[in-house]
Amino acid sequence: TLVRDGRQIRIFAWVTTLTLAFLAYNFNDIYLQSNVYLWQRGWGGVDNNGVAMVMVMAVPPLFFMGIHTRQWWLKPVCLLGVLLAAHVPLFTYSRGGQLGLCMIGVVIFIFSLIKLPNKIITIIAALIAVMVTFNLAGELVRERFMSIFVEKSERDESAQSRFSTWRAGWQCLKDNPLGVGPRNFNLISHQYGLPYNKSVHNLFLQTGADYGWPGLFGLCLFYFGSVWKCWRMMRTKWARRLHWPVYYATMVIVSMAGFLLCSTFIGMESVELGFILCMIGLCSVAHVDRIAVREQSESMNAIPELEEVVSPSGQPALAPA
C-alpha cells in the first residue's frame, strides 16, 4: 500500500541491496579484527548460522541488481558486495549456510550462462570464483562442510543434534496441532528429550511446534506463494517488456531458494530479510499486474460498439434504442 509505482519499488530494492552490501563489509571487518567472534557470539541477536543465512540471501540481490543496473559505479560496488557476502558463510563455519551458498552459486552460474552474452568469460569467471572460494575456505572449513555427508556413526554432536531436534519438533507438532505458543517450545523442550531452552534447528518445524498447523501452513503459503507469484509474473509479456521486474523476480526466487535450504538446518524465524525480499517481489508483481489490467482495459475500450460500426450505406448498423 505504500509503494505506488516502479520508481519506488526500485528505490526499495536498492536500499535493501546496498544495506546488505554494507552488512557484508561489516561482517568481514569484524572477522579481520577477531576471526572467531561471529562463529562464537553471532551478531544482532542471531548466532553464526543466522549471520550465514542472511549473507546467503544477500548474494542474489547484489548479483542481479549489479548486472541489471546501468550506473557504472554501482556495478563494482555490487560485485564487491557479492564477494564479501559469499565469504561470510565460510568463516562463520555454518554448514547450512555453506550448503545454501553452493546451491545459489550453481543457479547464478546457470542464469549467467544463459543470459549473459560472453559465455567464455562467464565460464572462466565461474572457475576463478570456485578456486578462490576453495582457497579462502581453508582446511577446517572444508572438513566441517564435508561432515554433512558422513555416516550417522561419524557425525559430530552439532550435526547429530539437528536430527534430535527435528524429531522433537515433529512430535510436539503432532501432540499440539494448534501449537504451544510463540517460542514456548523452548520452555518445554526438556519434555521431548532435549536440553532445556533448546530450539528446533528447522524454521518450519519450530514454527509448527510454536504455532501449530495453522502457523506452519501460513508460513509455507507466504514463502512458496511469493515464489510462485514471482515465477508467473516474470514470464508475462509486460514483465519482459519492462525488463527490470524479470531481474527482481529472479533474485527473489533464488534468494528464497537459498533461504529455504538454509532454513532446513536453521530455525531463525526472527530474521526478517526473507519477508523484505518477498515484499520486493510482491510489489513488483502488483505493479506488473496493474499495468496488465490497465492495458487490457484500454484494449477492450478501443473495440467499437455494434451501433457505432458504420454500414456500407454510411449509416450506423443499429439505430440507438
Image (cartoon, rainbow, N blue to C red):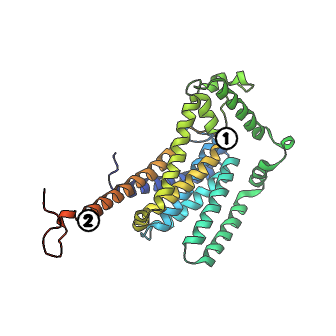
Image quadrant occupied by the N terminus: top left
User: What residue is disc 2 on?
Assistant: 303
User: What residue is disc 1 on?
Assistant: 40
Question: Residue 212: where, in percent of width, then height?
Answer: 58, 29
Residue type highlighted by circle 2: Ile
Crowdedness near tag 2: few (<14), some (14–19) or many (≥20) residues, C-alpha within 10 Å: few
54 or 25, which is in the foreground?
A: 54
142 or 43, which is in the foreground?
A: 142
Cα distance in 3D space between marks 1 and 2: 68 Å
Secondary structure found at label 2: loop
Question: Residue 180: where, in percent of width, then height?
Answer: 59, 23
Q: Nearer the viewer, mark 1 or mark 2?
A: 2
Crowdedness near tag 1: few (<14), some (14–19) or many (≥20) residues, C-alpha within 10 Å: few
Number of numbered discs: 2
Q: Is residue 88 left or right of residue 160?
A: left
Secondary structure found at label 1: helix
